[in-house]
Each structure stands twice: as C-alpha cells, then as structure tokens.
Amino acid sequence: MVAVSITSDVPVTLVGGGVLGEGDVKLALSHAPTLVAADGGAGPALRSGHEIQAVIGDFDSIDPADRDRIPPERLFPIQEQDSTDFDKALRHISAPLVLAVGFLGARIYHELAALNTLVTCPEPPCILIGTTDVIFHLPRRVALAMAAGDRVSLFPLAEVTGRSTGLAWPIDGLVFSPWARIGTSNRATGPVEIETDGPGLLAVLPRRALTRAIDALVPRP
C-alpha cells in the first residue's frame, strides 16, 4: 500500500503545471479549500496567493525558487518515473474529493495521461476542470441534477455497459469501448441517473455543471 502524504477532511484543490485559465484556482478553492500542488504546479499555486499544504511529485519541473519558498515538511518527493505527477499526487491524497486544475488544455499526451489516471486511480474521486468542460470517472451509480438540453458526453477507456435515465439516447443494452462505440454529444432530458457494470466510463459535462458534478460525487449531508 502507498503511504498517504496529505489527509484532508474537506475536498482538495490540486494544481498542475499545465494551462490554467483565469480564475481556475479560485473556482476550485471555492469548493475545495485545501491546496496541494503536483510538482511544477507549485508555481501557479504560490502565485494564487494561497497557502500550499503539500507539493507532491518527482520534482523534475518545480522551479528551485518556488521550492525554496515552501517549508521542507510540506515537500513530498517521489523518486520514480513510471507514473505522472498527477498520478503520484492522487495516490498520495486522502480526501472526500479532488478538484484538479492545470491538467487539461496543454499537450495532448498530458491530457490523455490525466484521463487514464482518472480510471486507474478511482480513489479519491477527482474532477478535472478545463476551460469548457469538467471530466470525471463515473462511479457505479451516479445521479446528476442536469437540465433538459445539457450536454452529457460519455467516453469509455475500457469496455463497459450500463443503464441510464434522463438521457436523450439511453445507454441500456449498449457496449461502450474505446475501439468501438463511444457516447459523446448525448444530452439530458432532465435529471440524469447512470449505472455502470464496471469501471472505465468518463463523463464530460459543461464547466458550468461543476457544482452538480461535485454534488453527484460527494452528496451533501
């Protein structure tokens, strides 16, 4: 078992070193007040003006000047090159939810690696926040408070089946697969419920649906 580096009772904002839109960190922190950086994400995290609780990664991209500004006990170097910094960070966070910014919109292979990590590291649940979309790995059952006409795209990274209510094109009886049928550009007819028979199905929602995605993954008490 991998040792946990940061434990939080509240959702965590994880900042990467990729493209960050204006207001991305502020948006994430409004829902996830504990701030953690993945390696080079320490720079934009520091520039956000908020206190960093931890930096996790192999430390091959963090600026030395940024590293010097962070207390040594909050630095968690992981010296292996078989996984990305996003993967390393998720595996070392224990929290109800992670909101990740700075992992979409840059190099396409970094984006693909981040999507892969959503499936291979399903705990803690994580939502990637991009310029226009939010992306997360669907749990076995999820209820989304969508409105009629909202875009609900589904993309498989493994062969997976399931059932749905509230989608214009129900998924019942379909076999999704990255090398066959995918489910992009579906839309809601109202509140959506999706049940899957296994892991591997990503949901891609409009960015404005972030709060609804959060409520679906971490229901309010």
Image (cartoon, helix red, strand yellow):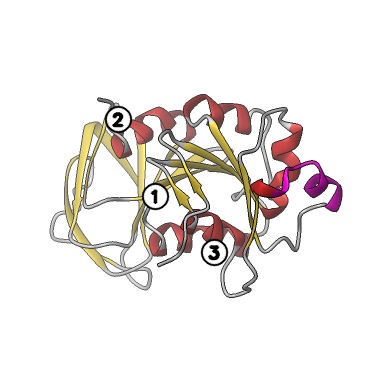
Does residue 69 belong to the magenta stretch? yes
- Judged from the image, the secondary structure of the residue bearing numbered disc 3 is helix
Along the line of sight, the residue nearer the viewer: 59 or 44: 59
Q: Quadrant of residue 193?
A: top left
**Foreground: disc 3 or disc 1:** 1
Q: Which residue is mark 2?
A: 146
| CA distance separating discs 3 and 1 | 17 Å
From where the camera sits, is residue 149 visible?
yes
Neighbor class of circle 1 (other Cα within 10 Å; few <14, some 14-19, many 20+) is some
Q: For the magenta stretch, what is the residue range? A: 64-72
- The percent position of residue 13, horizontal first and vertical second, equals 54, 38
| CA distance separating discs 2 and 3 | 28 Å
Q: Which residue is mark 3?
A: 113
The amino acid type, in three-letter code, at marker 3 is Ala
In this picture, residue 3 sits left or right of residue 15: left
- The percent position of residue 119, horizontal first and vertical second, equals 39, 61
| CA distance separating discs 2 and 1 | 23 Å
- The percent position of residue 148, horizontal first and vertical second, equals 28, 28
In this picture, residue 71 sits left or right of residue 179: right
**As displayed, is residue 52 above or below residue 153?**
above
Residue 124: mark: 1
